[in-house]
Amino acid sequence: MLQKAELAQTYRLVDWEKVKERQTPLLRKLVKRVYDRSEFYRDKLNKAGIKPEDIRSVDDLVYLPFTTKEELRNYPLEYLRAASEEEIVRIHSSSGTTGKPVIIPYTMKDVLDTAEFMARCMRMAGVTRTDRVQITPGFGLWTAGLAFQSGVEKVGAMAVPMGPGNTEKQLEMMVDMQTTVLTATASYALLLSEEVRRRGLRDKIRLRIGIIGSERWGEKMRQQISENLGIDTFDIYGLTEVYGPGIALDCPLHTGLHYWDDHLIFEIIDPVTGKVLPPGEEGELVITTLSKEGLPLLRYRTHDITRLLPEACPCGSSHPMIDRILGRSDEAFKIKGVMVYPGQIDAAIKETPGAGSEYQVILTKQNAKDHILVRVEGEPGADPEAVAAKCKQNIKRIIGIQAEVEVVPYGNLPRSEKKTRRIFDNRPV
């Protein structure tokens, strides 16, 4: 693998004009399709005073209104969809972590495109026909399990469709089937990796790759999972409203997450003003689906905070990149006048020797003033006082606030088979 100094010499800028040139005919076709076939979008565009012929290039995206999760929650499927009842072959649903689950319809083309995106991710991570892929995300209404399985089968690898939970059985199959690839949420991958280490199973398993996502996870957690299992880990990105997991993945160079710009337009906006930001600037990710049929999306606000990377990846892929997700705009919290994203807490912990990856942030009011406690695990053998002092110093340097830091023994904070909650705002409304 190239070292950082070598990578810096191989960087070249993305030709965004060429990207737009490829996407423009697909965008024009999409806008006409949703105007003709989705009552929701026809009403939305008419209200904005926009006709399909007004959108001539990707630069005209700024004239289109945003689509929000609240709209997808509140309107009936029949009003939203852009495909007939006969064309819809499947539905999936969001997890409902942030409210009422969103129901998304899929046509057969949507199903096949999902498999193609997942296969691209698998191949980029190095999965081949000789691999055995253990699938631990859930099957059913959640997109992840079926999406992973379809990608594995398209690549021609062997799927081991475990689904979530039952850690004993997961480890048993990992040993008996000699699984080579693990797919999981970040929280469950950490839990499994710690069990492998605790039980001394490293020499009995053959894992070499982990494809991990479904929630934002930091570099410290990545390091711990990789070290516990002896694998290379890949960050996979997606959301149910936009096909599910598989719309972006970091390549073996881990310089950013490649997204499939032949099917998706990624924009970054200021989450407050809605203004489009240039590549390199951090903001909220907005996605337009160029080829989705069941429920296409125009300028869908994801609330995920990231940035378009100006550089093309030295790996040679023609697909542009976003940075790893820093957090969600609706997950950020304000403390002592400063807006804080969970990714900033991750960054502080990553630079703290002796700190584990798991943490909790507890926000309270003390004497009518905001108080923040960061509870972090200490690695075995680490000096808790030294870890707390260094972590407090890093939080001050990176975020600019004073925080109380409490170090607890390794393993004391909860693990999850799905997604782990880390922010607890106990301040009175």
Image: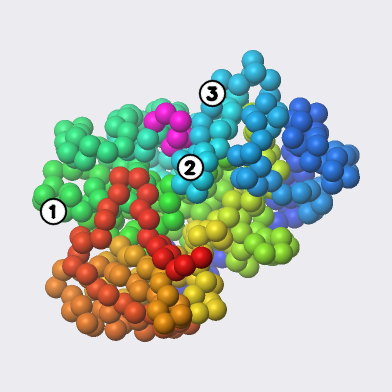
Which labelled disc corresponds to residue 96?
2
Which labelled disc corresponds to residue 198?
1
* CB contact under 8 Å: marks 1 and 2: no
Q: How is the image coloured?
A: rainbow
Query: Going from the N terminus, do you reach mark 3 or mark 1 first?
Result: 3
CA–CA distance in space, label 3 to label 2? 19 Å
Q: Name the mark nearer the viewer: 3 or 1.
A: 3
| Residue at the spot 29% in from the left edge and 69% down from the top edge | 376
Q: Is residue 33 visible?
A: no
| Residue at the spot 58% in from the left edge and 27% down from the top edge | 106
| Residue at the spot 82% in from the left edge and 41% down from the top edge | 45
Residue 141 shown in magenta: yes
Q: Does dot 2 land on a helix, a strand or a loop?
A: loop
CA–CA distance in space, label 3 to label 1? 41 Å
Residue type at the position of mark 1? Arg
Query: Going from the N terminus, do you reach mark 3 or mark 2 first?
Result: 3
Left or right of 247? Residue 190 is left
Give the residue number, with chain letter if any, for mark 3.
90
Residue 10 shown in magenta: no
Q: Which residues are magenta?
A: 139-144
